[in-house]
Amino acid sequence: MKIANIDLGPRPVMLAPMEDVTDRSFRLICREQGASMVYTEFVSADALIRDIPATVRKLSIDPGERPTAIQIYGREVEPMVEAARIVEQAGPDLIDINFGCPVKKVAGKGAGAGMLRDIPKMLEITRAVVNAVKLPVTVKTRLGWDHNSKIIVELAEQLQDCGISALTVHGRTRSQMYTGSADWEMIARVKENPRLTIPLIGNGDITTPEAACEAFDRYGVDGVMVGRASIGAPWIFRDIRQALHADMGAPLTVAERFDLLRRQIRESVDLIDEYRGILHIRRHLAASPLFKGISHFRDTRIRMLRASTLDELMEVLSQVQELIDNQ
């Protein structure tokens, strides 16, 4: 699959953009584990224009993580155009427009999935951003605002006409948020449209290698995107790629998975500071499947998620690893 001149190879698997998750360290680890391309956290156009330091930091890309997409969101044309030009100077491989984020603080203000209630404005923003930069521009969106407005088949054509180079579709409506099951039959309908010629990336419920294989074999997408299933488990890309291409070797051992989590913790602390770095990494620790099924784990889990220093957290992790080894 190619996005403009970016060759991602056959059946690529990408890391979805996720706020407070897909920082530079995590993106690099996911690439090392087999992700074909990675996406930054959401970048607010308004905050970028105001030069907010926390937003500007999101533009930092490690050479080892490429190809990388920087994703922007906003609700007005001019700020989105200005933000796209700023992002272009940061040197990503492509710019992605977020028309899919369902959370209230984004969609409720008309940005992200909120744009699904104003398609003319969505298309105006897309066309303006495409024309403002030389980089490839892609879009990520949802099936529609709610069950009664699943407009994605027609919308995909309209976005293609604006000049985007690829489209990612999350198989839920905004009203669904992240509940229920992703509608891959609807994603397949988008792909089956003979007038759609750009690559289509499917997103939603890709939590296992089997689900990724089904997305390609049954629903015919050009690529898949993994989101929440990667939190605390970057090795999911290795497992999926092995199922698709048999080129990643044996699954990581438990010890190797613990080593990856320790690396994430250290790099999170180095990137920010000890206090905020540990707060940031707690989401990965809380979600990691590495800790599922451990007997009498409740008290240890609480200590792990309440640890406030690097030494304390590393000590707890060593104890957890010993628990697993002794089971």
Image (cartoon, rainbow, N blue to C red):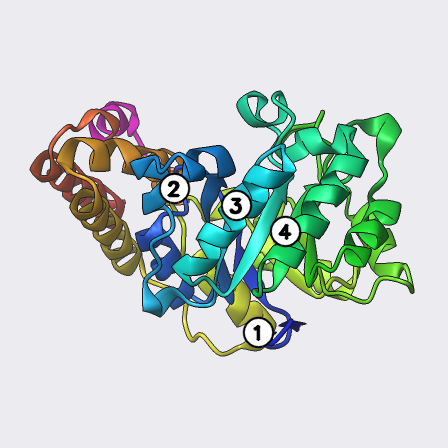
Residue under label 4 = 129
Q: Front-most of 20 and 155?
A: 155
Would you say 268 lies left or right of 111 here? Answer: left
Residue at image position (41%, 64%) is: 31
The image quarter containing residue 260 is bottom left
Q: Disc 3 or 4, which lies upstream in sequence?
A: 3
Residue at image position (48%, 41%) is: 42
Q: CA distance from mark 3 to mark 2?
A: 38 Å
Residue at image position (27%, 29%) is: 301
Q: Is residue 303 magenta?
A: yes
Residue 78: image x %, image y %?
60, 40
Q: Front-most of 189 and 107?
A: 107
Residue 6 is marked as 1
- Crowdedness of circle 1 by 10 Å Cα count: few (<14), some, many (20+)? few
Residue under label 2 = 288
Q: CA distance from mark 1 to mark 4?
A: 19 Å
Could you tell me the amino acid type at mark 1?
Answer: Ile
Q: Disc 4 or 2, which lies upstream in sequence?
A: 4
**Please, is residue 212 above or below residue 44 in the view?**
below
**Please, is residue 211 above or below residue 72 in the view?**
below
Residue 121: image x %, image y %?
74, 36
Q: Secondary structure at mark 4?
A: helix
Magenta span of residues: 295-304
Q: Secondary structure at mark 2?
A: loop
Residue 82 is marked as 3
